Amino acid sequence: MNFHTVFRASLYLTLVSSTTVLAVSEREPIFLALMIGACAVHAIKSSRGTMYVLSRAAVTLMIIPVVAFAIYEVRTAEYVLFAAAHFMIMLQIVKLFHVKKDRDIKELFLMSLVLVGVSAVLTIDIFFAPTFVLYIFCAVTSLMLFTIKSDAGAGGSQPIITRRIVVMGVSLACVCLAGTLAVFLTFPRLDPAFTPSITSSTNPLAGFSQSVHLRGVGSIQGNQQIALRASLGGPMAGSTSPDDVLWRGVALEYFDGDTWSIARTGASASSLRRRTSSGGASDPSKVLLQTIETSLSNSHVLFGVWEIKDVSITDGRNVVVEYDRRRRSYSVRTPFNGPLRYEVRSEAPPPRDVLAMAAGPVPRRILSANTQLPAPIAERVAPLARRVAPHLEYPTTLEKAEAIQSFLGAGYAYTTELPGEIDDPLSQFLFETRRGHCEMFATAMTVMLRSLDVPARMVNGYLGGQWNEFLGKYVVRQNNAHAWVEVYFPTAGGGQREEEAGTWVQFDPTPFVVGPDKSERGLLAVLSRMADYVCIRWEDDVVHYGRNQQASLARYLTYLAMHGGERMRRLRGEAEASGSVALLSFLVRRAMPLPVIGAIILCAGWLMRHKLPFGANKSSRSKTRFYRDLLKLLKRRGHKRMPWQTPLEFSRRVVTCEGPQWAAVHAITMIFCDVRYGNPPQDAERDAQAMLKALRVRSRGNGKTK
């Protein structure tokens, strides 16, 4: 393969790999497709051997729409950095078709490096890692070939590619990656930089939110992003099914007929106060402990099962927790943009027989906030609610709630289709389509209870979770997001404050919720959970690597240096005691770097032992193969050429030891010198091969000389 062809290919790969890094960050392949198309066109036009160059007029015509597009995108883009990166990609394409000097190629390399730097700021995705490694190898290879090309051009010689150059390029790329890793691990850390959430907004995505809009066109799409990880403990852990548990987030009280929100716009927030505990559960036997780790989120809500009695932050960060007394929700003071670890203590709701006897006055604030309805909605829904749960037949709050829940579950169907832009989506759901998503079911039950003067509110959170054996925790995804209803029971609990009296009990009227596949069997399911583990480790250990992680790494390395042997014996014991899936979990958690290290070693060994198709120069490698075969023959007879010996010195020493019958060694060496450093006579290689063949026959016949 021609050197210039290889160099152009490496340059194309460098440009494409840098654009791939941005495409992974942005999750938008349009500009990657443009770069690939431009490189393909340039490669076809340059197939004759020289770099294809457009005229100055054509380049000017290309620059005008590029600048116009850049101005438009800066004015309309959500993130200016993305607009700048897009402009740089377009400039790279223009520059590629106008390469006249070495300076132009250097500018292409520089722009690709800046593009990767911008992508590193904007992305948190694990796919950044392989694309970044690809870019490093492509860029290092291109720079080495560019240096060889420049030096050869300055000296008036023809550039060549040898196996040693390829090995050096791979080694240099590995050194660059190792240096990058060392700087990342040891450089003083600052707080995690702001990283914008990059998600497409073209289709509605299932996920937690602090408001609910009933209108919408299209269908709800599954969002596989992990929202939180949790483990359960305490007396109630054994009787709690993680598949059906409701992770309570925020209670929504105000309804305007189309949207649910926490409170009416402009309402007082005096119920919020700084708090980390509510005094613990009244019955220790009903306590459920949850250890929760949130993934990257812009939400400030803290989640928990049932009614949260206590929250404590465990990750060492100085986070202020606020407690909303009326809605009984916990949150941090400001939205956090990173993982947050905390422990929650919850109490199970009272049993049904206690709720059935609940009676008494409802606090004024709770009644006014949780029976509010727009007048047109109340007029349409109240007759249906009285027909479903008449007071004489269902006199208690519990009976009314159960009757309405059964009515919705039996007579209505679940769907992910949104109702569309209509004036009254709730009425359409109740009286026409009788099909809707979980927010529709929760809204219908809440409105029907409120029309009967029963305090109720909608709650947003998550439903269920999937066990991940690699993490040792339950994984809750964004498409586990769910909405349900909380109903107020006045005397089923206690509290000194008016707003903390009584208890709120969960009711879920949605008959069926489409969530992620909870099957734990099959290779694909295991690989999916393994991928979740790798992504979470990337987010925790790389994206949010900070001063605390640096200190932990230093302590771990110190411990490993002092107790490395004991540690290895314990890990070996764990591996031997593991089953098939457990062994896979052990390998992923404990020995994940080993396959990568092994692959690097194997690749390096392969490069050292095998010649690449384009790695041989005919004048300096393949034409002197006869001399390498001669050295192998002499080595078998006990003659090894030392590094300080010239070829002629070595040949004279061999002839002196073996005798005049081995004078052909000196003749073959002279031919080697002519081929390697001068102009060899005609048929010199054929004569050398013939003499070498005679030496092989003599060696087999005479044996090794003493």
Image (cartoon, helix red, strand yellow):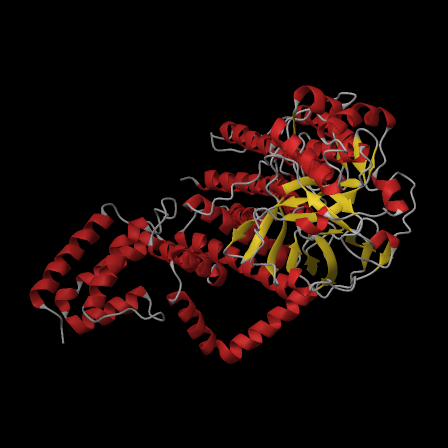
Q: Is residue 591 above or below residue 44?
A: below
Left or right of 472: which side holds 308?
A: right
Q: How many numbered discs? A: 0
Q: Residue furthest bottom?
A: 562
Q: Quadrant of the C terminus?
A: bottom left
Q: Could you say where residue 384 lies in the image, as x and y percent from the top left?
A: 75, 25
Q: In terms of image quadrants, where is residue 317?
A: bottom right
Q: Nearer the viewer, residue 301 or 244?
A: 244
What residue is rendered at 65% in x and 57% in y?
A: 292
User: In this rendering, does residue 318 appear at all?
Assistant: yes
Left or right of 513: which side holds 525?
A: left
What residue is rendered at 74% in x and 61% in y?
A: 310
Q: Is residue 466 above or below residue 645?
A: above
Q: Nearer the viewer, residue 675 or 590?
A: 590
Q: Could you say where residue 692 lies in the image, as x and y percent from the top left?
A: 18, 57
User: In this rendering, does residue 121 appear at all?
Assistant: no
Q: Quadrant of the N terminus?
A: top left
Q: Residue furthest front?
A: 392
Left or right of 557: which side holds 342?
A: right
Q: Could you say where residue 316 lies in the image, as x and y percent from the top left?
A: 72, 66
Q: Could you say where residue 686 lies in the image, as x and y percent from the top left?
A: 20, 48
Q: Is residue 504 above or below residue 597?
A: above
Q: In terms of image quadrants, where is residue 330?
A: bottom right
What residue is rendered at 79% in x and 27% in y?
A: 382
Q: Nearer the viewer, residue 32 or 244?
A: 244
